[in-house]
Image (cartoon, rainbow, N blue to C red):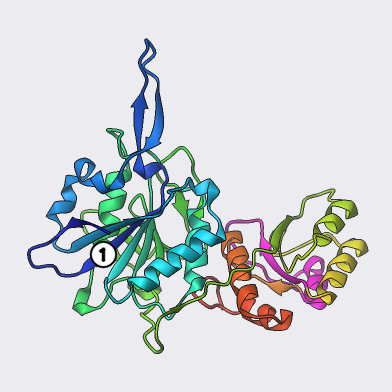
Amino acid sequence: MFQLNKAENPVGSVLVIYTGGTLGMVYDYRAGPDKAGQLRPFDFSQVMDRVPEIQRLDFDVSLITLDPIIDSSDMKPAVWVRLAQAIEAHYNEFDSFVILHGTDTMAYTASALSFMLENLGKPVILTGAQLPIGVARTDARENLLTALEIAADRPDGRPAVPEVCIYFNSLLLRGNRAKKRESVHFNAFHSENYPHLAMAGVRIEYNRPFIAPADVSHPFSIHTVIDANVTVLKLFPGITPAVVNAILAIPGLRGLVLETFGSGNAPTDAWLSEALSAAIGRGLVVVNVSQCEGGRVTQGQYQTSSRLQEIGVVSGADMTTEAAITKLMVLLGQFPYPGTVAQQLGTSLRGEMAN
């Protein structure tokens, strides 16, 4: 562990967990007339050279780095387990946690951690950057500094945002409600179906009615058994029985996220409902989420979704695909019985869906 800042009279303490990603990159320029450069990670313990403003913060900041650091495209459930274990190991030592993460799979990690961290009473904020910290016009500095300030904010001695969040480009979003929408602009994440939790301008303004209260009714614990035997089936006009049957026949498959049209609608072809019904009968848990980023699944509103409800497909309401697939993984790791998983899947556990 490396201490980035030791405040004189600290008002709190934050542990930064660096996983990799664009934020921790610098350009390594090759010799030659084109002066082309290649991005490479730098020793993040030297971040003070890039962001000296950390020394002005009135709280302690410490750093641990995953070994090896990874690109977010290589994120796997095993890394989520390592992150949860790191938070558990230092839970009583720090007031809050900031995870530095690549943007491509950040919404998946934020969603997964929200379900893996039980009775969370402290902020866990993920952030990253669209441009490397070694670039003059980078967004990394603002994202990092504001994520740290929000994590350390304790009005009335209690954490301002005691849940898993994503902070990016002035907005704090509930982690399991966020989706990446941009690869070019700085506003990389949005939350279509749930309001932002805070907006950082001249001051940080919290949207308090939408922030989950700290859960201190039971001791903090983590779930580390993740079952990745899940997949996503996105419906499209002209989808064939061969495609659907091939997916449903995947050996060991236990969970399926069905991405449907509009408010949860699917083709009315008998072969589709029969294939899904047979799979559910074999113990497959199927959850219905909409391909639309806004709105929600309302199974039974139209004839094209009523059959899904009849055969036991779980309505995912307004869950994102990222939340649905990670929730399935965590629940399948917890419960051996499909009926229990389906019941929990249709219940809001961490504010990931409307009741």
Mark 1, residue position: 14
Residue at the farthest left position: 8
Residue 77 in which image quadrant: bottom right
Judge left or right: residue 253 versus residue 241: left
Residue 140 picture location, percent across and down: 32, 44
Task: Give the crowd class for mark 1: few <14, some 14-19, many >=20 residues within 10 Å.
Answer: many
Figure check: 240 above or below 305: above
For residue 192, say whether it is visible: no
**Where residue 182 appears, x then y in whole percent?**
49, 44
| Residue at (54, 61) in percent of width and height | 78
Total label count? 1
Start-end of magenta stretch: 284-312
Q: Nearer the viewer, residue 177 or 249?
A: 249
| Residue 93 figure quarter | bottom left
Q: Amino acid at mark 1?
A: Val
Q: At 83% from the left edge and 70% from the top edge, which residue is drawn? A: 279
Q: Is residue 209 left or right of residue 111?
A: left
Q: What x and y, as percent, mark residue 322?
A: 57, 60
Identify the element where label 1 is drawn.
Answer: strand
Instruction: Residue at 22% x, 60% y: name it.
Output: 61
Above or below, 184 against 252 in this view is above
* Residue 109 placement (x, y as % from top left): 49, 60
Check if residue 290 falls in the magenta segment: yes
- Report which quarter residue 259 is drawn in: bottom right
Dividing the image into 4 quarters, which one contains the C terminus?
bottom right
Say if the magenta span includes residue 231: no
Q: Residue furthest right?
A: 270
- Is any atom of residue 38 visible in this view? yes
Image quarter hosting the N terminus: bottom left
